[in-house]
Every structure is written in structure tokens, then in C-alpha cells.
């Protein structure tokens, strides 16, 4: 295959599960015990900002304790022979830490915060975020996360990337969370699609190869067999 071929990879929570980060959809997912409307919506933040900030502080602390898994590293290695664009629903930085250089975060980034006044005013942030942490204009900072009910500002860019794909790889996502799940419909007709997930959703696409395995095993198998 040509080095110029463009692989677009869509990743979800299952990509990071084997690194020890709990997934949204599992019975023991990180949202269990929390009402999602209280920790992942603008209204929740308005009603109880301390709860929301501490919820994401816990996620941030956990992220510092885990490492990328072999699937992250395998995707990074693909850059040696392909042009690789990763579009992830995950808010962790495990793709970057494994060496991937072109990563778009659809739902925000846990290690960034932004001003409640100007959503484009973002800062790198690796420690706890508390009430009283302010932007340069004096407004409270909040997690740089796309909450339920908010627009997904990176969606247009993600669509543009998908439209230029030569190969699509989907890893560890239920394909039920929109608008992210709709991205697969923007890739060119007839290109190879690989779907890696232990419990894959039923997708109707031509040239679809399903690998019903967890990310670390499935990505390795895909690369060994098809790349």
C-alpha cells in the first residue's frame, strides 16, 4: 500500500478501557453513582460547580495513573507507512502519549480548561481545578469538555477529515452516541472499513470487516492481517 494512503481512525471509550479508564457504557462505568445531568451538563455546572469540578478532578487524577495500551502504540506506529488521522470521543491523552501526532478530540480534553466567558480561551491544566481558578479576564474556569446539550465544535473538522479517508477504522465505540456515530457516513463510498469492538453494533456498510475483539487484540490482528 502507498504511504500516501490516509487512514482515519474513530475511537471510543473501549480504546482506553484496557488502560484502566472506565467506560461510559459499561455497568461499572465512571458515570455510575452520578446523575449525568448533574456532572455533565451546563445546568449541572450552574447548580453545583463544586461537584462538577471534583468529578473531573477525579478523572484527571486517574488519568495521571494510567498508561497507553498496546492498541494506542500500534496506531501510532501506522504513521510510519500511512497518513493517520485519529478522531476520538475520548477526553484522555493516551493517543498522544503513545506517539500519535494527528489527534482530534471531539468531546474535549481532560488536561485542558477553558473560560466560562470565552470558550476559545483555553489553558493546559494537569492539576485539580477549583472554584476561584479564573481566566485572564476574571471569569471562572471550567473543564474543556463538551457536555450533553452543548454543540460539538470540532464536528465540521472531523467531517472534513472523514471525507478524505482511504481507509476507515472504528475502535471501541458503541456507534450510538451522536453526532460522532454519524461520521462513518461521510467517508467515500466503497473504502475499506474495519470495526473493532468486543460487542460490535450492527452496521450496514459495504467493504465492512468486523473484528469482535477488545482493542489491544483487535488492532494487532487488523494490522497483521490487512496492513
Image: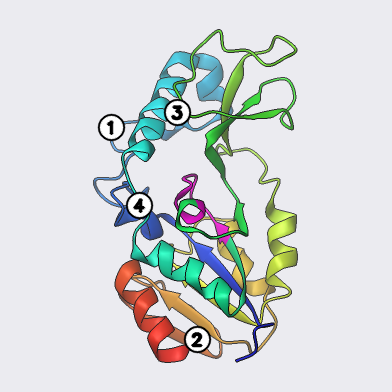
Asked whether disc 1 touches disc 3, contact meaning CB atoms under 8 Å apart, the reply is: no
Instruction: Give me the residue at 71% from left, 66% from top.
Output: 161
The residue closer to the viewer here, 164 or 209, is 164
Query: For mark 3, does the 10 Å Cα neighbourhood hold few (<14), some (14 to 19), or many (20 or more) residues?
Result: many
Q: Tag 2 or tag 4, which sits nearer the N-term?
A: 4
Sequence order check, earlier mark of 1 and 3: 1
Residue 136: name its quadrant: top right
**Point 53% across, 21% down: residue:** 45
* Numbered badge on residue 208: 2
SS for callout 3: helix
Contact between marks 4 and 3 (CB within 8 A): the answer is no
Mark 1 or mark 4: whose residue is earlier in sequence: 4
Q: CA distance from mark 3 to mark 2?
A: 36 Å
What residue sits 48% from the left and 87% below the top?
Answer: 227
Q: Which mark is residue 39?
A: 3
The reply to whether callout 1 and callout 4 are in contact (CB within 8 Å) is no
Position of residue 94 measured from the top left corner of the image (x, y, whole percent): 44, 51
Please tell me which of labels 2 and 1 falls first in the chain: 1
Describe residue 137's horizontal placement relative to residue 202 as left or right.
Answer: right
Q: Against 3, is 24 above or below?
A: above
State if disc 2 and disc 3 touch (CB < 8 Å).
no
Q: Nearer the observer, disc 2 or disc 1?
A: 2
Query: Would residue 66 appear left or right of 207 to someone viewing this image?
Result: left
Q: Are marks 4 and 2 in contact (CB under 8 Å)?
A: no
The residue labelled by disc 4 is 25
Residue 202 higher or lower than 21, as above or below: below
Quadrant of the rendered structure where residue 158 is? Answer: bottom right
Rendering coords of residue 18 (x, y %): 29, 57
Residue that label 1 marks = 33
The answer to whether residue 64 is above or below residue 9 is above
Q: Element at badge 2?
A: strand
What is the residue that sits farthest to the front in this orientation? 80
Amino acid at each position: 500500500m502507498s504511504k500516501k494512503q490516509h487512514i482515519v481512525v474513530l475511537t471510543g471509550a473501549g480504546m482506553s478501557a484496557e488502560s484502566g479508564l472506565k467506560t461510559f457504557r459499561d455497568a461499572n462505568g465512571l458515570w455510575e453513582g452520578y446523575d449525568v445531568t448533574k456532572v455533565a451538563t451546563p445546568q449541572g455546572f450552574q447548580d453545583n460547580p463544586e461537584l462538577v469540578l471534583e468529578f473531573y478532578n477525579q478523572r484527571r487524577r486517574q488519568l495521571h495513573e494510567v498508561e497507553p495500551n498496546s492498541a494506542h502504540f500500534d496506531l501510532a506506529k501506522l504513521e510510519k507507512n500511512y497518513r493517520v488521522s485519529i478522531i476520538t470521543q475520548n477526553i484522555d491523552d493516551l493517543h498522544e502519549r503513545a506517539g500519535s501526532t494527528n489527534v482530534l478530540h471531539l468531546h474535549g480534553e481532560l488536561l485542558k480548561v477553558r473560560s466560562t466567558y470565552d470558550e476559545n480561551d483555553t489553558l493546559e491544566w494537569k492539576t485539580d481545578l477549583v472554584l476561584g481558578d479564573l481566566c485572564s479576564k476574571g471569569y471562572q474556569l471550567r473543564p474543556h469538555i463538551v457536555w450533553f446539550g452543548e454543540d460539538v465544535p470540532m464536528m465540521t473538522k472531523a467531517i472534513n477529515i472523514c471525507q478524505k479517508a482511504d481507509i476507515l477504522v472504528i475502535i471501541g465505540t458503541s456507534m450510538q452516541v451522536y453526532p460522532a456515530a454519524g461520521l462513518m457516513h461521510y467517508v467515500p463510498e466503497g473504502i475499506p472499513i474495519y470495526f473493532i469492538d468486543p460487542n460490535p453494533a450492527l452496521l450496514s456498510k459495504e467493504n465492512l470487516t468486523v473484528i469482535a475483539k477488545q482493542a489491544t487484540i483487535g488492532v494487532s490482528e487488523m494490522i497483521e492481517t490487512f496492513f
